[in-house]
Image (spheres, helix red, strand yellow):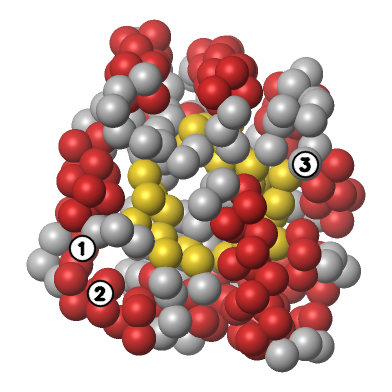
Amino acid sequence: MIDTHTHIYLKQFSEDREALLQRAFEAGVQELFLPNIDKESVAALKKLAADHDHIYPMMGLHPSHVKADYEEELAVVWEELTSDTHYYAVGEIGIDLYWDKTFIKEQQIAFDLQISKAKEMGLPIVIHCRDAFDETFEVLESHRGDDLFGIFHCFTGNLDQAHQALSLNLKLGIGGVVTFKNGGLDKVVAELQTEDLVLETDAPYLAPMPYRGKRNEPAYLSYIAQKIADLHERPLEEVDAITTANARKIFQL
């Protein structure tokens, strides 16, 4: 399995990071992808990826960290993307209106600019969207084309929104929410194909059942894969193989 979205470089894992990685490998998670947040997270992300052959970095500015100084933040993203470090995607990027709508215009601009940079470099994008499906799709539709591809991370939308994302050449990142009893995402995923999906934890956030409310970690990816296998009525091994192939194609491994 591949965890396509995990923040294990954060301080929440500073005391047991190597043990956590061992648990992940024992659970069948072979590769992990790290999304960047802002300029403050770059150093820790780069160090963890450099120290492990099976951990891959992405570079982007998270929408919740887009403020009045977004141009200064984006300058760091541009510098990193043209540095000696090989980044496998531009992410995580997008629009988040859950906490604060003050900088919605800046979020839209930053999202648009980062998509353009990804297309210019031939890289996938990894999208963060919270309480902002209409705004996110407005920007994405302006970039519709064969050179747009990537992952709609932590997808929690309805079936119509899923199909719109898929029509934009995006796979859907499915995490712990699919295991929540009243989350509703399970009903949407049941109507999709395994070929439309990739697996993710978003650790340390959104731990799946039976760990809901606790710190998430990559080893728990197996619970998400098993839920998808149950919903699609196919063997777990097939779900692992298909979602892994999807991820490897997106990230051009």
As measured in the structure, the alpha-carbon distance from the residue carrying label 2 to the one carrying label 1 is 8 Å
> Which label belongs to residue 169?
3
Residue plotted at (35% across, 77% down): 24
Q: Amino acid at mark 1?
A: Phe
Q: Secondary structure at mark 1?
A: helix
Residue 247 as seen in the image, left or right of residue 144: left
**Residue 211 shows up from this direction:** no
Q: Amino acid at mark 2?
A: Leu
Whole-percent x, y for residue 227 in the image: 65, 82
In the image, 168 versus 176, the foreground residue is 168
Categorize mark 2 by other alpha carbons within 10 Å: few (<14), some (14-19), many (20+): some
Residue plotted at (53% across, 82% down): 223
In the image, 228 versus 253, the foreground residue is 253
Q: On the image, numbered disc 2 is attached to which residue?
A: 20
Residue 155 as seen in the image, left or right of residue 92: right
Residue 85 as seen in the image, left or right of residue 33: left
> Which label belongs to residue 13?
1
Categorize mark 3 by other alpha carbons within 10 Å: few (<14), some (14-19), many (20+): some
Q: Secondary structure at mark 2?
A: helix
Residue 91 in the image: above or below residue 162 = above
